[in-house]
Image (cartoon, coloured by chain):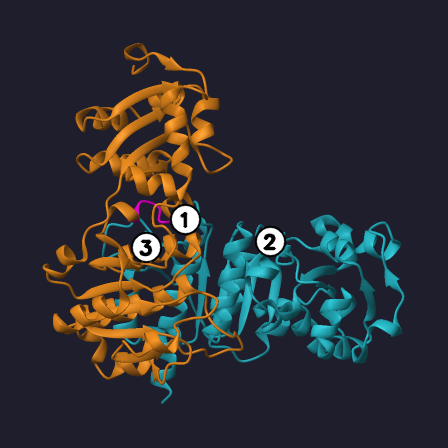
Chain colours: A cyan, B orange
Amino acid sequence: MAGPRHAVITSVKSTRVVAARRLASRAFRSTQRLFLAEGPQAVREAAGEKGLLSELFATADAAERHPEILDAAYVGGAVVSIATDEVVDSLGDTVAGQGIVGVCRFLDQPLASVLERPARLIVLLAHIRDPGNAGSVLRAADAAGADAVLFSGESVDVYNPKVVRTSVGSLFHLPVVTGVDLPEATAALKRRGLRVLAADGSGPADLDDEADSGALASPTCWMFGNEAWGLPETVRALADETVRVPIHGRAESLNLATAAAVCLYASARAQRRSSQ
Amino acid sequence: MAGPRHAVITSVKSTRVVAARRLASRAFRSTQRLFLAEGPQAVREAAGEKGLLSELFATADAAERHPEILDAAYVGGAVVSIATDEVVDSLGDTVAGQGIVGVCRFLDQPLASVLERPARLIVLLAHIRDPGNAGSVLRAADAAGADAVLFSGESVDVYNPKVVRTSVGSLFHLPVVTGVDLPEATAALKRRGLRVLAADGSGPADLDDEADSGALASPTCWMFGNEAWGLPETVRALADETVRVPIHGRAESLNLATAAAVCLYASARAQRRSSQ
């Protein structure tokens, strides 16, 4: 189907491929405001959002398997190339490539656009460094129905291929803001009526007590910190409350993405029950 | 301190080191009923449980940093060796070794021992294959105060180094049963008064409704399936109910460990509120 419409790119040294491959570097992504999305699911999401997909590389097999993705890419104005396995694999971050890689435009929004819309559940990631955690938190935030995810300036690049991959499409689902200044963002969120909660094992407040008291039903911004050292005192001081997930057994802590999911689902439940 | 008491092992070909390194293979672990635990935290846990640590390899630096681990190892009767960085690294699964690796005895218990103790929260993993997920579920189960974690016969080896590492010590904290037969185990758990809940996106029951109805306060066994294909119909049929974590946003699903944490914390909260 798609085959005859295209010259097949066979060289990993072709100009387009070399340019796309450079997007593995954060510096190059920032300059170009482009990033790579790998695999049919991520590329389908990018092709679905008008204008987000700039370029598409697919093997002939993948093009055959996913004609709807190529059609959407054409409609959205992306440059579509059929390429050899070697070429497509050279763009991928994972060993087992899925034959399809997209070059996407940055999708982060200014904080101001998030703030001008009504919101009851916001996630603020402070100094989060591990890409797998960042992607998992994006996915959990999406599942819990969060209105936006904000990343502080010191956080991992949201366009890192591992963040994109572990978010399993969620990067494309909800508004994302990057380079956020924590004092400025928390102050603005509070002015808009959100309670800012810092999730930290040191918290004097217990998540279950917050839920029982009805406090979680209010519009909330959850702030999560670095996996290794949590939220520093100066950041916790920006929150209305520091809340811990109770540890009932002998584990020292929960991992960041797990703790985030438990907190966000506790909020989602409290907010939905109170609005019933 | 520990240095003078030992000859330092300098060769990766030393008999003890070669034997320990073979524990990277599942088949060899099963024959020997021994596995490797890497890093000070895991080895400290193993040394703390009487008789679980069979052997300890530490660099001189690590021995200096963690004298209490070496002391506990001696008291527990483990063979302690000081070795070069190269030797200790050759036993580790991760690139950045932490200078300390233990050879531990298998710690799984028969299903019968778990069944003879009172339990209100049990985790049953059916066909779970990804070691990182298995370790994360162990950690979440421990944090949520679960009484035991059972692995079906078709699951990943609980002694796989990545399971051990991602459980962050929780493998040593709560009773683990391996090679469980699902029909037999679910029948036995039901006879002992536990509700068996299958967690699956297809579930007709919603987790929040289960919590609201008070049903989650009962003693419960949560059954979680394979990340890729969830729980097959034949396995769901063994449960009293199939329950889904509600997806409020556009995510297709939650990852297994995240979904497990949300379910287990919902049960922990319901059980603790009802017993207040």
Q: Is residue B226 above or below residue B27?
A: below
Residue B135 shown left or right of residue B266 in the figure: right
Q: Quadrant of residue B146?
A: bottom left
Q: Which residue is mark 2?
A: A153
Q: Secondary structure at mark 3?
A: helix
Is mark 1 in CB contact (under 8 Å) with mark 2? Answer: no
Q: Secondary structure at mark 1?
A: helix
Q: Measured from the top left, where is residue A135 in percent x and y?
A: 54, 60
Q: Which region is colored magenta? A: B166-170
Kindly tell me whether residue B65 is visible in this rendering.
no
Q: Report the chain holding disc 1.
A: A
Determine which of the numbered discs, if any, sits on residue A233 in the image: 1
Q: Residue at x 54, y 66 (%)?
A: A149
Determine which of the numbered discs, if any, sits on residue B206 in the image: none
Q: Secondary structure at mark 2?
A: loop
Q: Residue at x 55, y 64 (%)?
A: A167
Q: Report the chain holding disc 3.
A: B
